[in-house]
Image (spheres, helix red, strand yellow):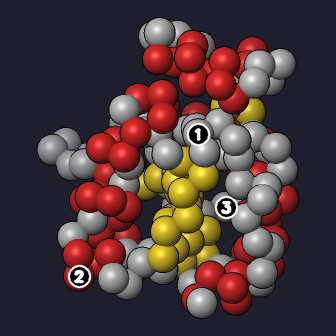
Amino acid sequence: MKILVFTEGTIFSHRDWLAFSREEIVRRVKEGERPDYSGTVPIGEAARKLQAWKWAGAEIVYLTSRREPAQVAEVRKILQQYGFPMGRVFFRQAGEEYKDVAERVMPDVIVEDDCESIGGEVEMTYPRIKPDAKARIKSFVVREFDGIDHLPDDIASFST
């Protein structure tokens, strides 16, 4: 089972925002606040959750909003620093949308946030995937900046 996990807003936030409610973070992003990426930290126990999925046999891969090679390298560094399972980090190439990346990767499962702060469903990956590909992918949508801690540890439940 290949699980594609979006990074920013789904499993990553910023350390300056740790003291704020999810609603406050969403408000700040809507107002244009974008803290320095170097302060990126995991949301909740995201690394532990993804490790549990990996130990259960899943291949974990990531999708980042970052596009520049140095920024993608920073995402890899953050994943390693916080104990996330290593996996390929995918990003949009020139002319690509997130759906194009997902269709190229063809995961069994996509875990992404609801993109509330940047426009909602129109900014998400899964809703824009072609119907034939979508039929083969299970989607888990979490509230932006709320983390994935509540998702099941048991990946066997993903196929039901």
- Of the residues shown, which amino acid type is indicated by label 1? Glu
Using the image, determine if residue 132 lies above or below residue 61.
Answer: below
- Residue 120 placed where, x, y %? 40, 39
Indicate which disc, 1 or 3, sits on the residue closer to the N terminus: 3
Q: Are marks 3 and 2 in contact (CB under 8 Å)?
A: no
User: Mark 1, mark 3: which one is toward the viewer?
Assistant: 1
Q: Quadrant of the C terminus?
A: bottom right
**In percent of the image, x 84 and y 59: which residue is there?**
48
Q: Are marks 1 and 3 in contact (CB under 8 Å)?
A: no
**In percent of the image, x 47 and y 52: which residue is there?**
63
Using the image, determine if residue 66 lies above or below residue 7.
Answer: above
* Residue 86: assigned label: 3
Indicate which disc, 1 or 2, sits on the residue closer to the N terminus: 2
State the separation of the CA atoms marked 3 and 2.
29 Å
Please tell me in which quadrant of the rendered image residue 58 appears: bottom right
User: Mark 3, mark 2: which one is toward the viewer?
Assistant: 2
**In percent of the image, x 33 and y 59: which residue is there?**
127
Q: Is residue 86 left or right of residue 1?
A: right
Q: Secondary structure at mark 1?
A: loop
- Residue 132 placed where, x, y %? 23, 82
- Residue 68 placed where, x, y %? 38, 32
